[in-house]
């Protein structure tokens, strides 16, 4: 809510009164309500109409029109019209207009956040349509195993997609009493413990563990935060990391099977007699199966990306390190140590490694204790982790 002065003037009203037309756009972007009326029952348009500068009113009206405001409603008098049949005051046209504007902005913001999700669904739908149109009949007749594996892969991919889109990544509930976590932090400091104050989230007032991070997209702290996935519009954390790794394998396998199916069907329907005739053969395939060529072009972008994601996830699981820690390890004091000798740059130190590649993989799939310190962790970091755990950190 924008602050008002003693006469209930908003910043937009005061700018119209002073004739400061260049700041109108800025104030409207900051959600100053153009329908706000002062104690004299004057809106920003009424004030601009009385301004000595004749250019102020037209400029303000032009900006309001561009943002979808009804100028006639902004100049209405006070009071809500009364519905005689209901006998209660109905919502004023100004309030209804502002509510519709906020709903439209909220819908646009949601659609923007889901843009990659919608693109993924459209791509899968297009590939499925092309498969049914060009490949399915030939595949089930000549290579039924490949057809069955591909169709199972598509179903598994959609099921995992829905699970990741709807699942809880490991959100920590915001603290209802911020003073509790603040007192726990201060208690550790009074006892002489080296407590990092950065572990207290000042947005949710959650006392974070060493692997809990605040996600600005979801406005929540996520346990074992790995990264925010735009395709699922959801963070990847403690509760859904395994499902994410599985869908990486499913996506790579399914895209490879589809590429193999396209090549086999093209070879079956348009024979290639000589390897030196590959370019004329490719031209015949492109003219006979244009949708097939378009889907193969899409796989040219999607398959390398998924292979890279699968590789990075496999490395992270094997070494017990998250993608967030790989990208931002210098932000966390427990992940680096000062350089020695002539090397002054900080050196990465993984305090969560359980000792070997196999143990880290076993910890990811079975034990589920990736946030616990490993055997090679320095004693100071272990003390901080224990103190945070005793204080109720998640």
Image (cartoon, rainbow, N blue to C red):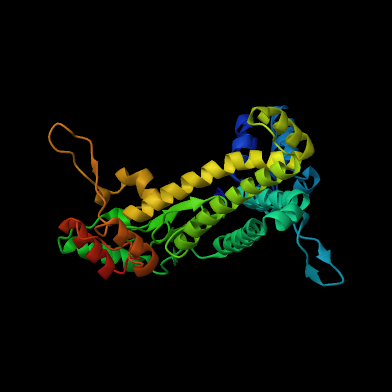
User: Image check: 87 left or right of 2?
Assistant: right
- Is 369 in front, or is 166? 369
Q: Which of 370 and 221 is in front in this view?
A: 370
Report the residue at 60% width, 51% height from top.
Answer: 257
Is residue 42 toward the left or the right of residue 170 in the image? right
Q: Is residue 112 visible?
A: no
Q: In this view, does 56 lie above or below 329?
A: above
Within the image, what quadrant is residue 17 found in?
top right
Q: Where is residue 325 in the image (x, y as percent from the top left)?
A: 35, 49
The one nearer the camera, 140 or 330, is 140
Q: Which residue lies furthest to the left in this view?
A: 341
Which quarter of the rendered picture does the C terminus lie within? Answer: bottom left
The relative height of residue 291 versus residue 367 in the rendered view (above or below) is: above
Q: In which quarter of the image is residue 225?
A: bottom left
Compared across the picture, whether 33 is left or right of 182 comes to right
x and y percent of residue 245 in the render?
47, 57
């Amino acid at each position: 809510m924008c602050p008002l002065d003693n006469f209930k003037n908003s910043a937009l009203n005061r700018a119209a009164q002073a004739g400061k037309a260049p700041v109108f756009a800025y104030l409207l972007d900051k959600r100053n309500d153009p329908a706000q009326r002062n104690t004299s029952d004057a809106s920003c348009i009424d004030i601009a109409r009385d301004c000595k500068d004749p250019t102020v009113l037209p400029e303000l009206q032009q900006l309001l029109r561009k943002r979808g405001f009804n100028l006639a409603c902004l100049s209405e008098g006070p009071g809500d019209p009364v519905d005689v049949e209901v006998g209660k005051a109905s919502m004023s046209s100004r309030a209804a207009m502002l509510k519709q504007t906020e709903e439209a902005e909220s819908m646009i913001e949601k659609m923007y956040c889901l843009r990659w999700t919608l693109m993924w669904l459209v791509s899968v739908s297009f590939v499925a349509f092309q498969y049914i149109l060009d490949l399915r009949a030939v595949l089930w007749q000549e290579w039924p195993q490949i057809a069955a594996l591909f169709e199972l892969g598509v179903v598994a991919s959609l099921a995992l997609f829905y699970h990741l889109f709807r699942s809880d990544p490991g959100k920590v509930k915001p603290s209802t009493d911020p003073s509790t976590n603040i007192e726990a932090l201060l208690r550790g400091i009074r006892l002489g413990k080296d407590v990092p104050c950065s572990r207290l989230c000042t947005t949710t007032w959650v006392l974070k563990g060493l692997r809990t991070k605040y996600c600005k997209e979801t406005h929540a702290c996520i346990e074992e935060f790995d990264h925010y996935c735009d395709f699922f519009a959801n963070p990847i954390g403690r509760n859904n990391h395994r499902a994410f790794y599985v869908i990486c394998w499913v996506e790579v396998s399914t895209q490879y099977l589809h590429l193999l199916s396209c090549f086999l069907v093209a070879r079956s329907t348009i024979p290639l007699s000589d390897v030196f005739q590959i370019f004329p053969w490719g031209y015949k395939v492109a003219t006979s199966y244009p949708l097939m060529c378009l889907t193969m072009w899409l796989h040219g972008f999607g398959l390398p990306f998924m292979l890279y994601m699968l590789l990075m996830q496999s490395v992270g699981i094997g070494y017990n390190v998250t993608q967030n820690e790989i990208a931002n390890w210098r932000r966390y004091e427990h992940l680096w140590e000062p350089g020695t000798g002539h090397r002054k740059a900080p050196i990465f130190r993984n305090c969560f490694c359980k000792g070997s590649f196999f143990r880290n993989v076993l910890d990811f799939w079975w034990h589920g204790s990736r946030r616990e310190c490993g055997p090679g962790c320095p004693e100071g970091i272990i003390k901080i982790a224990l103190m945070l755990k005793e204080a109720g950190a998640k």
